[in-house]
Image (cartoon, rainbow, N blue to C red):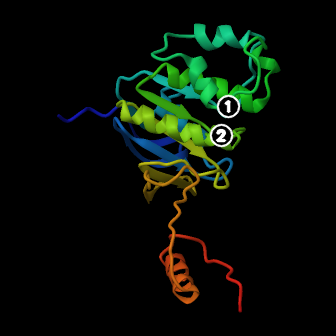
Amino acid sequence: MVRAPIVELRGDIGHGRSFVVGGLDLCVEPGDRLEIRGTNGSGKTTALLHLAGLTRSRTARRTGSSTVAWIPAALEPPHHPTREWLTGFRPHAVDPRAVLERLGFSGSLAQPLDELSFGNLRKVLLAEAFAATPDLVVIDEAASGLDVTGVTVLGELCHDHAERGGAVVWADQDSAPELPATARFRIRSGRLLDAGPGRADRGVAGRRSVRFDGGAAEIEQLIRRAADLGLAPAPELDQP
């Protein structure tokens, strides 16, 4: 059975005769985990806002009927109890407090949102969004403010959401930890470029480990061959 795309975004996002992001040709399907990378000011947030349906452009066309959860890179949180906001914002398919615990939340649910640390606030936003199980989760600066536990669990949440038939699209800085993705894109010089297929079977940090047993010379040769293939950075091996 062929499932319809969750959302499609095509064209150029612009104002007048200039565009912010051009060459858009995004088709987000159930099960997708798509990453967009680029420098500050490259247009990542603009592309995500249009994909989420929160802003529109006459030169870009968005199609698709879907429920969307939007997680901004930053916001001015209200002075509202975290517990009430987490559970009373919209219906949830799973308990958002359980998701929050997985993310390693270290604040107090009795605290107002505006008294949480930035990292804990991000975890609250993520937990609430994924617990609602919308068709599409869109995350700006996905790894921003998250510790190692948060990044690891976020990768797991994206995977689980896609397995249930949803989709996740996120943007991040080049220096941010790499989440497992099914496809990757990059915004460069105002154009959205295909950065090649994702490697969804890799760990959240983009690494897998392999153990080799054998003589030192054979192991050194294997390590250098892996580096040549781009499977690992070139090692600094001790010289005898």
* Residue in the picture at 48% in, 52% down: 185
Say if 219 sits above or below 187 in the image: below
- Residue sitting nearer the eye, 110 or 53: 110
* Distance of label 1 from label 2 (alpha carbons): 6 Å
**Residue 67: x %, y % from top left:** 42, 21
Kind of residue at disc 1: Gly
Q: Position of residue 80 (x, y in %)?
A: 74, 9
Residue shown at the point (69%, 39%) measured from the top left: 146
Quadrant occupied by the N terminus: top left
Which image quadrant is residue 128 in? Answer: top right
Percent across and percent down for residue 222 are 50, 81
**Residue 167 seen in render:** no
Q: Are marks 1 and 2 in contact (CB under 8 Å)?
A: yes
For label 1, the crowd category at 10 Å Cα-Cα, with few meaning under 14, some 14 to 19 and many 20 or more, is: some
Q: Residue at x 57, y 37 (%)?
A: 154
Residue extending farthest to the left is 1
Give the vertical position of 164 relative to 159 (above or below).
above
- Secondary structure category for the residue under label 1: loop
Most distant residue in the bottom direction: 240
- Nearest to N terminus: mark 1 or mark 2: 1
Instruction: State the quadrant of the C terminus.
Output: bottom right
Pointer 1 residue: 104
Q: Residue furthest right?
A: 115
Q: Position of residue 182 (x, y in %)?
A: 41, 49
Q: Nearer the viewer, residue 189 or 131?
A: 131
Residue type at numbered disc 2: Thr
Residue 174 lies left or right of residue 232; in this view the side is right
The residue positioned 47% from the left and 76% from the top of the image is 229
Of residue 230 and residue 22, the one placed in the foreground of this image is 230
- According to the image, label 2 marks what residue? 149
Q: Secondary structure at mark 2?
A: helix
Residue 24 visible in the current orientation: yes
